[in-house]
Structure formats: structure tokens, C-alpha cells
Image (cartoon, helix red, strand yellow):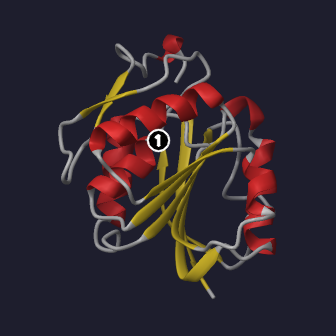
Amino acid sequence: MSRKSGYLRNGKIRIIAGKWKGRKILVSNQVELRPTLSRIRETLFDWLNPIISGTVCLDCFAGSGALGLESLSRGAQKVTFIDRNLICISVLDQVIQSLHEYNVKIIHADCCQWLQYSNDSYDIIFLDPPFRDYMVLFKVIFLLEKYNHFKEKSWIYLEVSKSVNIISSDKIPSSWILYRKIITKTIFCCLYLRKM
């Protein structure tokens, strides 16, 4: 998160609930990094809490890894973290090692390229791209569908700038059902349910 936005405090975020509740996690202190706000994470995982245990998750544009780490803390079986920023990936790898967590993949790659070669499918997919590059979100959505990275029933979380009218976008597949949304002064967040 941009320092101007005040989302980074001393380069750490806090795990909200689960086995690592209260644990402070180191994050890369880069200007473009924008971890999901704790109050939004709390609401999101309240929504996901009934189904998150045992799930396989994908944290695209992982950055700090906040969403994937919160998932693991709350009982997700496995999380794949992808980010093209090597510094973010290196810091995330340190965090994972410090937590002694082994049910993860940490991938330094461009999401759009990686999705074309992976055969994995997921119960929960987190899509939180850089605000300045929101068009990549639509490309990732297209690739997720084209290469069918979904389970029979999957949940997809999107977080974008409020200036992007994501709900009315024709880039959202008709098979994605809007389940919940959060709107703040600057952020638009949506949780979709996709069924085969």
C-alpha cells in the first residue's frame, strides 16, 4: 500500500484470526505495495469463514501475501502465491519460513503467463492487482476461464479502485454470481461465487 495512504505501518501487517491470530507479518516496504485493509480482510473472511477450512487457494498479485496468509491461518489446506515483484516474493518466502508453513507454493512470475501453463484449480481465488494496472485484472479473469482454474464451486474475490465500475463490466463472466460487496471512499471489493 502506498505510504501516502497509510496502509503500511513499520512494514508489518497483523493476522486477524486463526492459528496465527495477532501475529505480525513483515511486508516489503515498497511504495506500490497495497495490502488489503484489515477491516476489509476481516469482513471478507467473515464471509468465507463457513467454507474456508480445507480449501485450495490462489493469491494472484500476492504482494504482502495478506489474503493467502489469512486463509492459511484460518484452515485453508494449501495456498499458491504469485507475484512478479521479486522483492515481495523474497519477503513472503521469509515470512512463510518463519511460520514453518509447508502447504504453499511461492511463485515469482507474471500471473497472466503462469495461468496459461498451470493445470491447478482452486476453491478460492484472490485478485487484487495494482490499482494503476487494473486492465490486467480483466486479462486474468479471461485466462482463469479459458484454462478452467476452478473447482466445481469456486469463490473469487476482486479488489479494485472505486473508479473501476467492476459490477457493470462486461468482462465479468455471466457464470459469476455477485455474493457480497464492499465500497469505501477509494476501494471497490466484490466476492463472487462461480458454479460449474
Quarter of the image for residue 77 reads: bottom left
The image quarter in which residue 71 lies: bottom left
In the rendered view, tell whether residue 187 sits above or below residue 1: below
Amino acid beneath label 1: Gly
- Residue 178 x, y percent position in the rendering: 56, 68
Q: Is residue 20 left or right of residue 96?
A: left
User: Where, quadrant-wise, is the C terminus in this rendering?
Assistant: bottom right
Residue 124: x and y in percent read 50, 66
Residue 81: % across, % down? 54, 49
Residue ID at (28%, 42%): 99
Q: Nearer the viewer, residue 144 or 56?
A: 56
Does the rendering let one see residue 138? Answer: no
Q: Is residue 150 above or below residue 67?
A: below
Residue at position x 21%, y 49% from top?
A: 17
Residue 114: image x %, image y %? 75, 55
Task: Tell me if I can see residue 125 in this picture.
Answer: yes
In the depicted structure, whether residue 141 falls above or below residue 146: above
Label 1 belongs to which residue? 65
Front-most of residues 163 and 99: 99
Q: Residue at x 18, y 37 (%)?
A: 22
162 on left or right of 21: right
